[in-house]
Amino acid sequence: MLPDSSRYASLRKVPRQPRAVRTVERIISATGTLLQRDGLAQITTNRVAEEANVNIASLYQYFPDKQALLSALLQRYRLDLARVLNDMLDSLGEASVEDSTRLWAQAAIGHYRQHSGLLGELLKHQNMLADLPEARDFEHHLMEAMRRFLMRQRSRLQVSDLDRAIFVIFHACTAILARHVMDPAPYYSDEDVVEELTCLIARYLY
């Protein structure tokens, strides 16, 4: 895996050599393993270094503290999801709001299902993690992608302030999807929730 400036934006130092990249990825993976297995309170730099089988000095080259470890872990999963959704929204062309909502909501749920154990732990602590720069960057990139998509059909939308509408849509959908995947009601399927979100957004925008 080659170094990536976005992927490693939160690090103290960006790894340049393949060996350094592998070390950083091992440290981030070890953070995820400990989070999923033992919970957030049990994560320390020493325990992560031990789990990753790296010298603590090597860890500190890139991660000054526990928050930096969590930032990098959050960055890994949110960047992957942001790229998927960003590319999807940019490729939709003149697709309707209804069709686009179904696609990105299904993709978001699918991403969670694929990484449910680790993302479940992150979502449990989302209030604590919400102030990390990586969380803000994730919001910014996705809302910008939503804005580019909606601007292509601006004349059909009834909302007066598009940026405000995007803010409301993003945070409403994030809250609903997080609740659904974390504590699903037995009488609502993924498809039911996606359809309700689709209806909610279409009625709000048109």
Image (cartoon, rainbow, N blue to C red):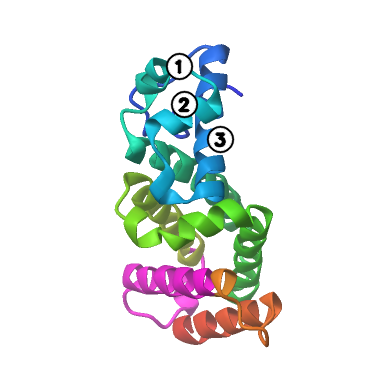
The kind of residue tagged 2 is Ala
Q: Quadrant of residue 60?
A: top left
Residue 191 part of the magenta segment: no
Q: Secondary structure at mark 1?
A: loop
Who's the residue at 32% across and 48% down the image?
A: 132
Cα–Cα gap, marks 1 and 2? 6 Å
Image x and y of residue 14, in percent: 41, 21
Q: Quadrant of residue 18?
A: top right
Q: Is residue 8 visible?
A: no
Dominant secondary-structure state across the stretch colored magenta: helix
Q: In which quadrant is the N terminus drawn? A: top right
Q: Secondary structure at mark 2?
A: helix
| Most foreground residue, 138 or 167 | 138
Who's the residue at 46% across and 18% down the image?
A: 15
Q: Secondary structure at mark 3?
A: helix
Marks 1 and 2: CB-CB under 8 Å? yes
Cα–Cα gap, marks 1 and 3? 15 Å
Image x and y of residue 181, in percent: 58, 69
Give the residues drawn in magenta, as a range.
152-179
Q: Quadrant of residue 57?
A: top left
Which of pointers 2 and 3 lies earlier in the amino acid sequence?
3
Which of pointers 1 and 3 lies earlier in the amino acid sequence?
3
Say which residue label 2 marks. Answer: 49
